[in-house]
Image (cartoon, grey):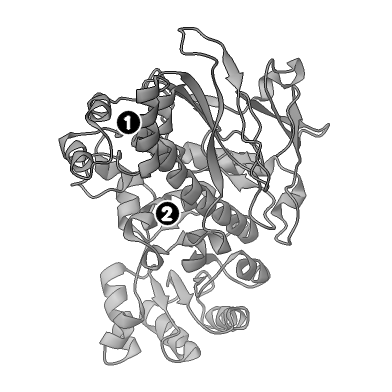
């Protein structure tokens, strides 16, 4: 797998340094104590959803699989660790041979989740699992936050398509991941060509105000764009006077004009006026695209407006106020001794302050009501109840170190649409509220 597929510069040799130093110091100490080889189970979950959110969206799973495959300590990385005296020679020798050889299970990408959902489970030796904490969390926390915001926006937009256009509002590599996550969450296209290249997401884009300002007048700008891109292009009509621009746009392109874009002003009022003007000019099929700092609330407020598509940037790539999903990666079980075949015993943090966790290797299932809609997220340890056996959520992603669950991005996108549709209708409400279904703990588990 080429590192470019991860959205990394081509000169980055691996993902091994996308980690925090304490992962390596824990490994060093565990090797010295003889406990690094103990079988361990780590789980990714969140204790709560962002304030007011009704559900979360799993995104970034495919990127996690790429990152695990590329987690290698090559000569340059080992030299850096030696020069900084971060680990000793024994640990460096261990890292030089590192290949994750364990198993990873998780909610499939695009699935929804709730507080306590075991979104991902990583099993293997302590040493090989603990090193993956930071890179897994950095991907899942970012991508799931963006996908959740995208999902809310897609729900608010209904059947109207959404364009992801936030690349200039975030880090250049985060922009690629954000476009990918937005697509999973329901966006139709992206303006980011790197995302289109790496993930085969449809790309769109026409012109900015600078193109209009370049020319001596608006007519010349519109004529240049139409002659280059065709009559079905989208003309930006709010550089000067909107009504005059719309008139000029139809005169230049004819009633076959593809669309006009509005990027400022009272979008509700302007959209109605533009629609009326286009119809009066005979451009009844010309669409209206609106942009300008939209979020899910602004999109919802335009539901009654004659708008055909939305372009969203800043609010999307920053998670619409919640840029992280607050997921954690916790050890929940480990072998009771270092002996081969030693049974697993549950472990959990029990300190005060709201950061407790539930021990034990968990399963998760979604119970449905009589109408077939989700009514509870059930999480447990031990045997799965018969009535939930066919509703289990975790799937095998990596087996014995080998990725076994690659899929096209469209599969995750379709899965999310189906999962969201299976939630109670109140899941689509934008008002503040609790998770749309409760999390219940079975087999003696308790909430966190």
Alpha carbons under labels 1 and 2: distance apart: 22 Å
Res 78 visible: yes
In this rendering, the answer to whether 21 lies above or below 193 is above
Asked if residue 439 lies left or right of residue 28, the reply is right
Residue 234 at what x, y percent from top left?
40, 71
Which mark is drawn over residue 10?
none
Circle 2 sits in a helix, a strand or a loop, which is it?
helix
Q: Residue at x 44, y 47 (%)?
A: 138
In this rendering, the answer to whether 282 lies above or below 323 is below
| Residue 446 falls in image quadrant | top right
Asked if residue 369 lies left or right of residue 390, the reply is right
Res 186 visible: no
Asked if residue 353 lies left or right of residue 210, the reply is right
Q: Residue at x 68, y 25 (%)?
A: 391
Q: Quadrant of the C terminus?
A: top right
Q: Quadrant of the N terminus?
A: top left
Name the residue tied to disc 1: 69
Circle 1 sits in a helix, a strand or a loop, which is it?
helix
Q: Residue at x 47, y 61 (%)?
A: 317
Asked if residue 363 lies left or right of residue 282, the reply is right
Name the residue tied to disc 2: 179
Residue 23 at what x, y percent from top left?
39, 37
In this rendering, the answer to whether 353 lies above or below 313 is above
Residue 228 at what x, y percent from top left?
26, 71
Q: Please identify the residue farthest to the right as the structure is shown.
A: 370
| Residue 322 falls in image quadrant | bottom right
Q: Are marks 1 and 2 in contact (CB under 8 Å)?
A: no
Q: Please identify the residue farthest to the front as the structure is shown.
A: 33
Question: If you read the primary sequence from the N terminus, does the residue marked by circle 1 or circle 2 appear first?
Answer: 1
Number of residues whose C-alpha sits closer than 10 Å to that of mark 1, classed few (under 14), some (14–19) or many (20 or more): some
């Amino acid at each position: 797998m080429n590192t470019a597929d991860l959205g990394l510069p081509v000169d980055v040799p691996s993902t091994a340094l996308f980690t925090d130093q304490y992962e390596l110091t824990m490994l060093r100490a565990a090797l010295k104590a003889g406990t690094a080889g103990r079988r361990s189970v780590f789980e990714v979950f969140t204790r709560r959803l962002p304030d007011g959110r009704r559900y979360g969206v799993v995104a970034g799973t495919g990127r996690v699989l790429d990152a695990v495959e590329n987690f290698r300590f090559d000569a340059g990385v080992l030299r850096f660790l030696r020069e900084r005296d971060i680990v000793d020679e024994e640990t460096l020798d261990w890292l030089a041979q590192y290949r994750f050889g364990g198993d990873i299970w998780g909610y499939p990408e695009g699935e929804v989740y709730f507080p306590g959902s075991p979104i991902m489970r990583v099993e293997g030796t302590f040493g090989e699992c603990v090193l993956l904490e930071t890179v897994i969390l950095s991907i899942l926390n970012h991508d799931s936050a963006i996908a959740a915001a995208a999902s809310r926006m897609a729900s608010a937009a209904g059947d109207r398509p959404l364009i992801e256009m936030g690349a200039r509002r975030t880090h250049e590599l985060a922009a690629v991941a954000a476009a990918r996550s937005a697509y999973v969450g329901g966006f139709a296209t992206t303006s980011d060509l790197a995302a289109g290249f790496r993930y085969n997401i449809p790309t769109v884009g026409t012109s900015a105000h600078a193109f209009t300002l370049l020319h001596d007048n608006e007519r010349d700008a519109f004529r240049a764009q139409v002659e280059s891109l065709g009559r079905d292009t989208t003309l930006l009509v709010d550089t000067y006077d909107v009504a005059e621009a719309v008139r000029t746009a139809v005169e230049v392109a004819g009633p076959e004009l593809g669309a006009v874009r509005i990027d400022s002003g009272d979008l509700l009022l302007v959209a109605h006026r533009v629609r009326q003007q286009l119809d009066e000019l005979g451009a009844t099929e010309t669409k209206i695209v609106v942009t300008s700092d939209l979020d899910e609330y602004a999109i919802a407020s335009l539901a009654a407006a004659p708008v055909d598509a939305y372009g969203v940037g800043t609010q999307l790539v920053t998670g619409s106020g919640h840029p992280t999903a607050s997921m954690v990666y916790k050890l929940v079980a480990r072998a009771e001794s270092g002996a081969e075949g030693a049974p697993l015993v549950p472990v959990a943090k029990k300190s005060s302050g709201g950061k407790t966790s539930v021990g034990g290797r968990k399963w998760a299932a979604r119970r449905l009501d009589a109408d077939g809609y989700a009514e509870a997220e059930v999480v447990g340890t031990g045997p799965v109840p018969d009535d939930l056996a066919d509703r289990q959520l975790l799937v095998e992603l990596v087996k014995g170190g080998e990725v076994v669950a690659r899929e096209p991005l469209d599969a995750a996108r379709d899965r999310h649409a189906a999962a969201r549709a299976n939630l109670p209708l109140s899941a689509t409400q934008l008002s503040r509220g609790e998770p749309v279904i409760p999390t219940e703990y079975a087999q003696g588990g308790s909430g966190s």
